[in-house]
Amino acid sequence: IKKTLAKPGVKNIVLVDGVRTPFLQSGTIYADLMPHDLARAALQGLLNRTGLPKDAVDYIVYGTVIQEVKTSNVAREAALGAGFSDKTPAHTVTMACISSNQAMTTAVGLIAAGQCDAVVAGGVEFMSDVPIRHSRRMRKTMLSLNKAKTLGARLSLLGSIRLAHLAPELPAVAEFSTAETMGHSADRLAAAFGVSRLEQDEFALRSHTLAKKAQDSGLLSDVISFKVPGKDIVSKDNGIRPSTMEQMAKLKPAFIKPHGTVTAANSSFLTDGASAVLIMSEEKALAMGYKPKAYLRDFVYVSQDPKDQLLLGPTYATPKVLEKSGLTLNDIDVFEFHEAFAGQIMANLKAMESDWFAQTYMGRKTKVGAPPMEKFNSWGGSLSLGHPFAATGCRLVTTVAHRLQKEGGQYGLVAACAAGGQGHAMVIEAYPQ
């Protein structure tokens, strides 16, 4: 056995268990729900699976990216709906695609600081229904109308409304700082690192094929069954579709036309879903009779230039977290990286293999090296399982814990990129069997 990463005088923090609702393509079976419905289902699933007393949780932290205005603190609404004690505080975090990573590390911080012993973290994203606003001009007019005292003032304001004011404003899919969509950025990144369309399609096909195999073999045991009100029970992800290279080759570029390489087939799709994990101090978990799945060890957050390096979070975060924990790439048995786009993930793997990139951008003498493919996302990834923005982090961590148990490894590494040019990585250690 390799050395353990336990530190003298530092609390061991463990992942007791993790669950998620099936991840479904937006506009399908979950279409009539609201985000807190999915979050509640994940939280109830966690309670059912762990047999956790509802008042044994000290705190709940939940991530979400595109906020439903009515439930802005979705953590609290979902927790109340799931039957947690109304005395358990809950707050919501947002950090683009690493929102539930942020929820989990917030939980780790609360436990490490001695504030809590048991925290539930998770994330939810609901792309079937997103808040669409009136234009700013229209909002201003409506607010003025609300305050107008006389009929004359109201009529004059109504008369000032033009057709253009009625154009709706959709939630931005573009980066606020650069006004560029993530798909465009992924396309430019793939071009910069010489990732061909063929390589991207092959990677996407690998993701779908491995996900299908994992689903059929019952390896995706974090997925809970969920009875959708007025509809059937859903018990598996519905975006897994192994295709053929020929079918994929027919698709047109989605962002940069006509020469781009990013298509609908090699990108993650809009997804609805929620996830939840139970994180505890090891002491408390054992006292309550739990057999933890893994230790949550070192983690880092990184930030880069959001224009040219928007999606390179894993490249920057991986060496940092390895150094922090005193490990090398060879010590890691299981890798789970978030796959937003096949072009993005492959550009990261190429950047990690480049001495030039390490020296020019990372202030390192040599490259870190890329994870070996036989240890990498071997049960599929976001391209096939789906990517509800804020729920993916918990899926990655729970998958690492399950893969370490299944494969008999000791260390796993999670890494993900996020909008804004940010990224996260965490080292997870298997709990002794």
Image (cartoon, rainbow, N blue to C red):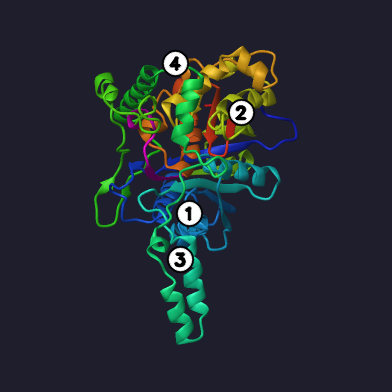
Mark 3 and mark 4: span between their CA atoms? 55 Å
Q: Which residue is mark 2?
A: 317
Q: Which residue is mark 1?
A: 67
The crowd level at tag 3 (other Cα within 10 Å; few <14, some 14-19, many 20+) is some
Between marks 3 and 4 in the image, the one whose residue lies nearer the viewer: 3
Between marks 4 and 2 in the image, the one whose residue lies nearer the viewer: 2
Mark 2 and mark 1: span between their CA atoms? 27 Å
Q: Earlier in the sequence, mark 4 or mark 2?
A: 2
Query: How far from the left and from the top, in percent, is residue 308?
Result: 56, 29
In terms of image quadrants, where is residue 243? top left
140 part of magenta stretch:
no
Identify the element where label 1 is drawn. Answer: loop
Residue 1 seen by the camera: no
Segment tinted magenta in the rendering:
264-275
Identify which residue is drawn at 38% across, 56% down.
34
Q: Earlier in the sequence, mark 3 or mark 2?
A: 3
Q: Which residue is mark 4?
A: 374
Q: Quick one: 210 or 225, which is closer to the camera?
A: 210
Q: Amino acid at mark 3?
A: Met
Q: Amino acid at mark 1?
A: Gln
Q: Which residue is mark 3?
A: 138
